[in-house]
Image (cartoon, helix red, strand yellow):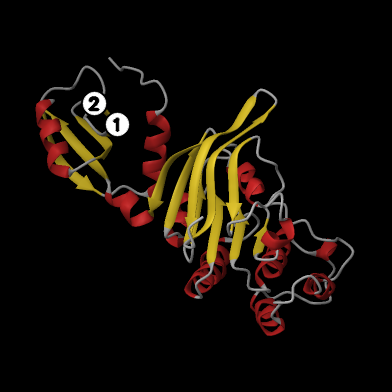
Amino acid sequence: MSEDRVVSIAGLSRRFGRKLALDSVDLQVPRGVVFGLVGENGAGKTTLIRHMLGLYRCQAGSVRVFGRDPVAEPVEVLRRVGYLSEDRDLPEWMTVAEVLRYLRAFYPSWDDGFAEDLRRQFELDPKARVKTLSQGQRARTALLAAIAYRPELLVLDEPSTGLDPIVRRDILTAIVRTIAEEGRTVLFSSHLLDEVERMADWIAMMDRGRIVLRGPLADVKGAHRRLTLRFDEPPQQPPRLAGSLFSEGYGREWTAVCEGPPDLLAREAAGLGARVVGEDVPSLDEIFVARVRSREPVESEG
């Protein structure tokens, strides 16, 4: 594996009974980036992450983390990885301080000063027992535990679950950016695309077990356009431009999310009898919806 790749996945497929959870997934995560893995619930994000952590053995394909097989060499991989799951599984009977002391023993790189700074920032009572914590406090405790030993790769599976909007925007974003600025890598999965758009440098979109789009966020957004088309007469069916992923509208005005050079798209629109009266860069959410819907059968509207 190249030194600049923290994660390298090739041809990974996984079935649970008759369900194909992962379908020939290829994915590389560069070193030192914030990498967002996006998709609806059930798209395969958590299954993919569990392969990275060595919790699932590959049925087909390969997974390498820091150039190693996480199933064959779990200690060598996991000592360099911090992980926060959606479940926030913590010992109910321990206090916050006891949880941190317990985990500290496993990681030689545990940073006591950093952990204490985070505890205060997260407003966690060290004497409070886990069973008495709110969902948000549990999430903060689990996040603290995942990053206090400054892992080279931080994996967050739906990290916003249980966090209020202020914590999501301020604390989570600040921590993720700080880790990346130190040259370490963050991979996080989320179905909240506005959150991914705010934090990520790179993205991969998953839909029904497949990667449908990947790359630097700026490149992904720069390759797409949202066009507003105006027709002299209402089209008999949704307009289909070359490069159009999805279109919606009614009567003489339609909006299309497209991929391709703007001048080519304008010529395509003119060929359909339409003028481009508006052009903008779509949000990541709009791109995702367009990509997913482009894989579904298009129903004509009369």
Residue at the top extreme of this rendering: 302
Amino acid on which disc 2 is placed:
Arg
Image position, residue 154 (x, y; %): 60, 63
Residue at the right extreme of this rendering: 93
Image position, residue 293 (x, y; %): 40, 30
Asked whether disc 1 touches disc 2, contact meaning CB atoms under 8 Å apart, the reply is yes
**Image quadrant for the C terminus?**
top left
Question: Pointer 1: residues within 10 angstroms few (<14), some, or many (20+)?
Answer: many
The structure residue drawn at horizontal position 20% and vertical position 46%, both measured from the top left corner, is: 279
Badge nearest the viewer, 1 or 2: 2
Q: Quadrant of residue 77?
A: bottom right
Q: CA distance from mark 1 to mark 2?
A: 8 Å
Please count the marks in the image: 2
Q: Quadrant of residue 47?
A: top right
The structure residue drawn at horizontal position 15% and vertical position 33%, both measured from the top left corner, is: 230
Circle 2 sits in a helix, a strand or a loop, which is it? loop
Image position, residue 111 (x, y; %): 69, 80
Image position, residue 149 (x, y; %): 68, 73
When the figure is inspected, residue 91 is found, relative to residue 70, above or below; the finding is below
| Residue indicated by mark 1 | 247
Q: 111 left or right of 202?
A: right
Q: Earlier in the sequence, mark 1 or mark 2?
A: 2
Circle 1 sits in a helix, a strand or a loop, which is it? strand
| Residue indicated by mark 2 | 240
Residue at the bottom extreme of this rendering: 113
